[in-house]
Amino acid sequence: MTLTTENIDNVLELCKSGNQQAQLEIYNRYYKAMYNTSFRIVKDSYIAEDIMQESFLTAFSKLSSLKINSTFSAWLKRIVINNSISYYNKHQKTINVPLDDVIYKVEDHQGIVEDYDATSIKARSIIEMLNGLKENYKMGLTLHLIEGYDYEEISEIMSISYANCRTLISRAKDSLRKKISTQNEFKNSAL
């Protein structure tokens, strides 16, 4: 069975009836993206894998609630993000992962070969600065800039009002800009 955009609806129908081959086909198509989504939030590969698998089980059991005008991938991604944020919020005080481990694991799981060209160094530096932001700023910017959610979706995911979401993202961007500016000034003065 090969999954294409033309037959995804057919495969999802088979999933609703409990067809394990169809479920495996859906899993194989989306598991990497869903793992990466969870990992960016919980920052632990084993936990991200558990959350991803639990999210698939939830999705398969609640497939009948998928609205016709929704795409499966967006719906599944929302389940993964909600489960990841829920886990993160419950265990936030106990998670303590060094930044080097996070960057290494993300690159390792995405198959990115480390190189030390200027672009890679700039990206690593921005990730470090993003991780140095307040938790709600980091979460908001990750959802907005990396995951691609709009303000309305982020406000729903983070359980804040639309106006607070816009303010949060704006302040988070300003904070990140200041960190980048400060670092650039420091580098220029060191030269």
Image: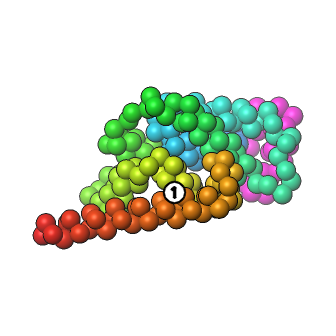
- The kind of residue on which mark 1 rests is Leu
- What residue is shown with label 1? 141
Q: Where residue 189 appears, x then y in whole percent?
A: 15, 69
Q: Where residue 64 appears, x then y in whole percent?
A: 86, 40
Q: Quadrant of residue 95?
A: top left
Q: Is residue 86 left or right of residue 173?
A: right
Q: Residue at x 66, y 47 (%)?
A: 159
At label 1, counting other C-alpha atoms closer than 10 Å, the crowd grade (few under 14, some 14-19, many 20 or more) is many
- Whether 17 is among the magenta residues is yes
Q: Is residue 90 left or right of residue 96?
A: right
**182 or 109: which is nearer to us?**
182
Report whether residue 89 is seen. yes
Residue 147, placed above or below residue 39? below
Q: Which residues are magenta?
A: 1-22
Q: Residue at x 13, y 66 (%)?
A: 190
Q: Where does the N terminus fall, quadrant-wise?
A: top right
Q: Where residue 111 appears, x then y in whole percent?
A: 43, 48
Q: Residue at x 85, y 50 (%)?
A: 67
Q: Where residue 169 appears, x then y in whole percent?
A: 54, 61
Q: Where does the C terminus fall, quadrant-wise?
A: bottom left
Q: Residue at x 19, y 71 (%)?
A: 188
* Image coloring type: rainbow
